Amino acid sequence: MQRARLTKIFVLAAAGAISLSACAARTDSGSGGSDSSAPQAAAPSAAADAADPAGDGKAQCSPTSIAYAGTINGNNAALGINILNGAKLAVDQHNKANPGCQVKLEQFDTEGTPDKAPGIVTQIVNTPGIIGVVGLPFSGESKAAGNIFNTAGLVTVTPSATAPTLSENGWKTFFRGLGNDNSQGPAAAKFMTGELAAKKVCVIEDDSEYGTGLAATTKQALGSALACEDKVKSKQTDFSAVVNKVKAAAPDAVFYSGYYQEAAPFAQQLNDAGVTAKFVGPDGVKDDEFVKGAGDAAANAYFTCPCVPADQFTKFTDAYKAAAGKDPGTYSPEAYDLATILLKGIDGGKTTRSALLDFVKTYDGQGLTKHFKWNDKGELAATTVWTYKVENGKIVRNTEIK
Amino acid sequence: MSMTHDLSSFVLAQGDSWITFDVKGFVDQFWANTIDGLAYGSIYALVALGYTLVYGVLKLINFAHSEVFIYGAYAVWFTFFGLGFRPGVTPELSVIELIGFLLVALLAAMAVSGGTAVLLERVAYRPLRKRGAPKLVFLITAIGASFVLQQILFIWRGGNAEQGIRLVRNEPVFQIFGAAVTNVTIITIVASILLMIAADQFVNRTKFGRGIRAVAQDPDTATLMGVNKERVITLTFLIGGLLAGAAALFYMMKIPQGASYQGGFILGIKAFTAAVLGGIGNLRGALLGGLLLGVVENYGQTLFGGEWRDVVAFVLLVLILMVRPTGILGESLGKARV
Amino acid sequence: MTVTSTPPAAPAPVRRKRPISDWWNNLPRVQQWLVLVPLVALVYLLPVLNPPIITTQPGYDFPIAMFEVSRYALVAIGLNIVVGQAGLLDLGYVGFFAVGAYVMALFTSPDSTLHKLPFLIVLPIAMVVTMIFGVILGTPTLRLRGDYLAIVTLGFGEIVRLLADNVDPLRGNRGFQSVGHPPGTNADGTALFNNSDGTPWYWLCVTVIIIVLFLVGNLERSRVGRAWVAIRDDEDAAEIMGLPTYKFKIWAFVSGAAVGGLSGALYAGQLGFVNNQKFDVVTSMLFLAAVILGGAGNKVGVLLGAIVVAYIPLRFQAIAEYKYLIFGLALIILMIFRPQGLLGARQRLLTYGRQAYQRLLGRGEQVSSDGSLASDTPGEKA
């Protein structure tokens, strides 16, 4: 009898396996997250003349290389691949349009950890053909290896490392393609207490430098509006104790300072527990993955981001989707913009490291995400923080925080 | 001299800022945390059973068991997807439909996890057993297998977690001491306990179970007595895998975003901790250890702050092993151990 | 039966010929040195030679890769004391490594509020602090046996990492920049030891490895080493023979910890940056993998194991997506074909072993791997 029962289980299990194999298809998430049906504020008009990597198609240069250095396989690989794909798209568009100037994008995997970075970066620096670098994505690895780029005079443009202290090392080669945590935190606080009219705010942070740094500036700016705070670990999935804590505090808004991977289950678990507070996340959360992942909870979500919304994103989004097979994610547009800047330099005949470094240093132009012009520390001269919200399952722009 | 001065100020000046004691929060949220902890703990317990069974029979820590679990989670996700459900939309289903769909997902997850566990045993462990390899070597192939299984998922599905699909909202059904008990919590706890009772009965009452216990007690004598050792070992891995698959379904119901290529790792470590807490090799110990760990983690998080959650779990483990060196209930699958 | 009754011509049953190790063990000391010296010289020259095929370029800078490999080798030697010699399964060894790295960072980085000290002074401090940690962790845990010890050490390793994460002065993910390095400048005035030149660091690490190998080798042949082997092979029997097993287990833990701390401090110095990343369970497992893969208990073996574990992912750096798949497969395949490790540990006489083997067998060492000789040897004082 036992045997019979066991056999039955096997048969059922096999049936399950068959049904499983029949449906193993890749998901296709909805279309891009930018073409808004009801814009709340006008996008800056200057964005219309955003730099195009294709240029005029007449560029001439000897074959040269730029590099992506960052995580490809390892912690937070998804974020690294967003950046890599963004940069790759820019290079591909450039190469297609400019047969006389072929630029190669070399890829180096730092695994997102500081211990691998110096070896990789030294390798990049010792490869003479590489004259510019998109990366490093994370603050930790940047701290470990930034000085090597500086010594070699190899320009780096980072699409995502936001630790404020990075620009205070005196590195001449460090350029940040977005505002640092110091600019976003106070803006987020202002947004929550102002536009969202929150009297009580809970700030939950993860254990990354990005999360803790941003949470610190946000909490400081919130002052007495801070109702509760807690910390979570990256890769945590069960947030029940935090949810219970937030629920007890009954805030008007919850600010999650971290990345979308933890934000999605956290927002959903908050929503399930009946917490109706607005869920606010920074640029690390502003991603279609969050909107899809958080399910019903996403409708209640707002984002702050030191990136300018651009309505002609559609063109970028379509091209990205065609190339990478999925929607652009967090930092993909930034990487595209920054790679474009390097490519423009190469098109302009800046094919040595020092020439390209000078080009980036004095660059002044509009990109998809924002206007790029750096100060002597490598910070963007003017950063604006915009807020976004979710409408019909898509991230749409909300307002600019002034 | 100046050094000692610096050292003391460094400890004292910051001594109270990085750890807090929120006793009020602990008391206020006690019941809510208990219920949530029990739900999560029963998932730990189901996964812990896999560790405990394999350990009981082979005296082997199957470090790749977390991957067996996460393959089940992917199976759940693909089943939901294949049934036509999509991320971000929670469908309105009748109870009958819901039960039907969940059962399909359960079977798929159990099949995939069970299959992965058996395959793992065949590829990574059996060749070593044939060669009479030392025990530690199994640990290394387990790590190797863990890498391979993770990387297959990574290469196939990429680094992002699968976007959460769920069939049922987590909605309160009734209240205990002011704390909501949700439908998913009830399903998780009740089904886990039923499955664990079934596993316990299977091991203690059936012929196969007797084989498992015999091999756990003394593999050589058991072989002499006509027990097919290899089959028993396969069966043990299979049961562990089936339970991990079931755990994966409950996990995915609670956390629909749970299917990611590294997503099994932390849960695996916790489940293993739970197994040791209760007494590794002891089925009831796994249940007790899992529930205890789930609850204590939540208490610790509220009391000391979220960053101390894992510290609390591991400190609990160390403390319990200090007092009871073989876990709370002790080892029992093979009754005695040299 | 005793060995003396066996004529030299017919040694204990030979299961497998080991031509190389046999040849090696039969060489006189002087000739061994004659072989070793050029070999060591070659090892020192590796990053300069940068041989094709072996090189990790163009994916990863070869001298730095060589330092990584040597760092793993040092770790493996330290862990081998605990796992290979004394038979204590330690899954939290990365905790000691982390302590060493953090001590170095705390005393040399400008980000720390502590008094600044030179690298070479902090190096021994790091070892001492790690040894203290060894005692702190060992005292409660070493009463446990086998797998319980494994899980508790795993827990302790995680606790160390989480403390680095949570305790504010340890700066969590922010970390410490500009960690110190040994003195010395290049011709152009830049520091000789910097994070983009692996060669000086590699030389330093290899030198440290050679010194540690000497020390560990002596320790192994001493009363302590024999006590460890006794504990590893049968703890109860050792205890009954009057061996204070607990004390010797703590000694093993502490000796291992010292080497772990040393390698952690070197790691921190080379990287120039320390934060909470890379002190996780996976790293701990890889350390253990190096020891087991090479052959627990065999010093040369664990060196090989460390080379495999550290080198394979770096070698395949250029195919980032597949490198860990390759690595995982390599672990499984190597273990299936060499279950005893690349160079397995053999039972052999320790103290005056060379002389004894010469007298008894008329040559360097027995070929058998079944240990009949060693286990039958009378008169070994514990």
Image (tube, helix red, strand yellow):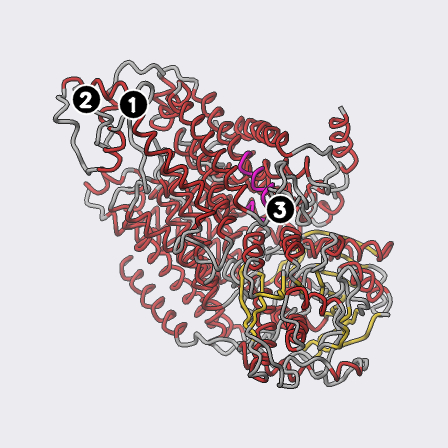
Quarter-of-image position of residue C103:
top right
Q: Which residue is mark 1?
A: C349
Quarter-of-image position of residue C28:
top left
Q: Nearer the viewer, residue C57 or C14?
A: C57
Mark 3 residue type: Asn
Mark 1 residue type: Leu
Q: Using a 10 Å C-alpha cutoff, classify the residue at mark 1 as few (fewer than 14 neighbours), some (14 to 19) or many (20 or more).
A: many
Question: Circle 2 — which element?
Answer: loop
Magenta segment:
C262-280
Q: CA distance from mark 3 to mark 2?
A: 55 Å
How far across and how far down the image is residue C146, in percent? 41, 34
Mark 2 residue type: Gly
Task: Tell me the chain of label 2.
Answer: C
Task: Tell me the chain of label 3.
Answer: C
Question: Circle 1 — which element?
Answer: loop
**Tags 3 and 2 touching, CB below 8 Å:** no
Mark number displayed over residue C362: 2
Q: In the image, which is nearer the foreground, mark 1 or mark 2?
A: 2
Q: Quadrant of the C terminus of chain C?
A: top left
Q: In the image, which is nearer the foreground, mark 1 or mark 3?
A: 1
Of the numbered discs 3 and 2, the one sitting upstream in the chain is 3
Q: Residue furthest front?
A: C187
Task: Tell me the chain of label 1.
Answer: C
Q: Which residue is mark 3?
A: C276
Q: CA distance from mark 1 to mark 3?
A: 43 Å
User: Is A105 situated above or below C162?
Assistant: below
Do badges 1 and 3 share one subunit?
Answer: yes
Question: Circle 3 — which element?
Answer: loop
**Tags 1 and 3 touching, CB below 8 Å:** no
